[in-house]
Image (cartoon, grey):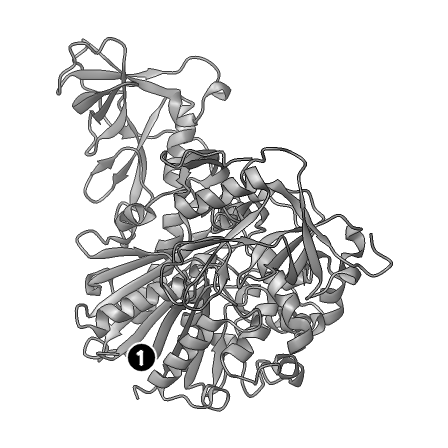
Amino acid sequence: MGRSVAVVGCGQTNHSRRRTDVTQVGLAREAAQRALADADLTMEDIDSVIIATGPVLFAAVNQPDKWIVDALGAQGKPVVRVTSGGGTGLAGALAGVNQIAAGTHERVLVVAYDKLSEGALQYSISTLYDPFWGREFAVGIMGFSASYWRSRIKPLGHTEEAAAMVAVKNRKNAMLNPYAHVKKEVSVDDVMNSRYLCSPIKLLDVPPISDGACAVVLSSESAAKNSPDPAWIRGMAYMAEAENAIRRSMRQSEPLTLAAAKVYKQAGITNPRRQCDVVEVQEPYTCFELSYYEGLGLTREGGAAELIASGATQIDGDIPVNPSGGCAGANPIGAAALIRLAEVVQQVRGRAGDHQIPGAKVGLCQAGGGWANLRGVSVVSAQKN
Amino acid sequence: MGLLVDYDEPQMMAATLTMPYTLTTGPAAGTFLAELANNRIVGTRIVSTGRVIVPPEDYPGGMSDVETEFVEVPQTGAVTTFTRTVNGVVALIRLDGADTDLLHRVVGDTAGLAAGDRVAASWHTGSVDELASPFLQLAGFAATADGTTGEVTPLSGPAEAIAELPYSMKLDYEHSYGPYYGRMFDELASARRIVGSKCPKCLNVLVPARGNCDACFVPTGQLMDVADTGTILGFSVIHLEFLGQKRKPPYVYAEINLDGTATRLIHNVGGFDITKAEELLDIGSRVRAVWKDVSPGSGTLDDIEYFEPIDLPSSGA
């Protein structure tokens, strides 16, 4: 991986269905200020900035990085915008990690955000599809997600009840997260009785639409020497598969499997369930979390329903998944993947607050980008190696 | 029936996205826009330095939280620089007492306009409702012979900020089909058939037709007729309604593997009692294309009305 990279500060906005008090740059700045405060650094200490957001159609401003430079006081610094659909936040982090690992920068501020209240979300997302081929049938990412989930129900046992348990867990965990804005516990019956949006996906399987931002400060080892509690990036990868892939599996995400294998090798993980203390996944629909249990190797293929039913992924289980509440608590898409990273970082730094997993030392996070075809994974730990 | 297209000409598909937005203005731009309705121009003054920024900004101190105040800026100034466009003169204007330039139009007689010329604000006089944006309440700046220089003053009784602003973008595109898509959609329109391409290495048939196999990355070369029957790999009954949706829910979205191909086609399944879709359809259900009764077709996947189930259980269509 080149030089060691640490995360020395994290910040999130108070996410909301609609933040009317700030523009999109105000949102990004709020997270950046909190990350710098958490790192006990100022903008003077930052020598590179990565801005990560979703498609510009989400909020109607092309090249928003140009606008944000002023509000961040980033003029005169290298500023690069990264966008890669839903997993954008982790793609942005990877760009920053590579800058430090390669030795070109010492401290990188990664800021990820989306202000989804401003535009027509499903319409914007539907433009991810080829304009010639299938866009007229697109239902955001919900249509294909539902369709893929259905193909997993019989062979893998990813039942609607199992997904409902994910909704119950994540919404309960979100109650402990001060940044989440969906704060309502639900029961399995509530989820099962909620109406179908795209069957088998039901209303309570679906995350909110949110305005929000997240920022992290990445640091080289030498620049992190004054940090009392750096979290070390032990591995990070972001993988793609072909858009109209030949014989694409409807059961497992191939790029996720590839990313996990690469990251586990980098991090020396041979048994993720035993070696990781906490996991954050970018669901956003409950059916995805079940799929990711298998893709990340937390259980065997077809073991996801059993895993959620066993309680192992609850906040007090042996492999807690989404103690923050995940996307069910807040889902500002461009920031969502960076939030997953920031959450596991704060866990291994012991700064996760009310949803802290006691003694967490190794954290695993996953990001989902594009529609089906981009997936990222990272492992962080309190120990450098 | 022959193909409809002259392949010596580049083939394009016109597409339009019409996207509505509700923008959050933030306190500075929101106050600026609200005060334009009172024919006042607002700026931000940084208290410590006296620097005046027009239009105002929320974060003139970057990441530092500097103390700022709203000020009323004079309606007179000088042209810093300008350009003539087909839609008139656009200029950077330095209002008196300001430290930044405001971009706006110069209206009226601009024949002899020169950098340094004095200008004064020109206000829209009709109803605000007829404006495309509240910004256009300030219609522009016109040359003035009055050489009096105005002064920046504290903003008395600022109007409540306009917090949200409706906005829309209509985006017109012309997408190039390229040779494979062009031929494929032409075949849909003219011959009611689906065309794929075959990889000479892995022998998979790929739909939509493409120039390279994405598994082997070798040129495909050979176009193939593909069956309009297939198998459902996944499906969903869509109840969700959203802006820009082309079909009225409920309807069935499906990923279909056409017989003999190695790829997925996204389309709708119809022609049966949709309310029973959950019972009647399954992974592996067989479907066939129902073509629209128009000739020639539109040259899109819409030339297929939907895929209908084959051999439904007796409770079906």
Count every numbered label the image shows and give the total.
1
- Tell me where residue A31 sits by quadrant: bottom left
Q: Nearer the viewer, residue A147 or A320?
A: A147
Residue at 34% of width from left, 60% of height from top?
A111
Instruction: Depth check: give the residue in front, A203 or A303.
Output: A303
Residue A40 seen in this snapshot: no
Q: Quadrant of residue B302?
A: top right
Q: Mark 1 points at which residue?
A: A230
Residue B85's x, y, as percent? 25, 20
Q: Is residue B269 above or below residue A201?
A: above
Instruction: In the rendered view, tell whether residue B258 sits above or below residue A256.
Output: above
**x%, y% of residue A200?**
69, 63
User: Image height check: is B208 above or below A340?
Assistant: above
Amino acid type of the residue tagged 1 in the rendering: Pro
Q: Can residue A86 be seen in this view?
A: yes
Name the foreground residue: A70 vs B68: A70
Q: In screen coordinates, is B32 left or right of A148? A: left
Name the residue: 36% across, 16% down: B123
Q: Which of the 4 image quarters holds residue A215? A: bottom left
Callout 1: chain:
A
* Residue B161 appears left or right of A190: left
Q: Quadrant of the N terminus of chain B?
A: top right
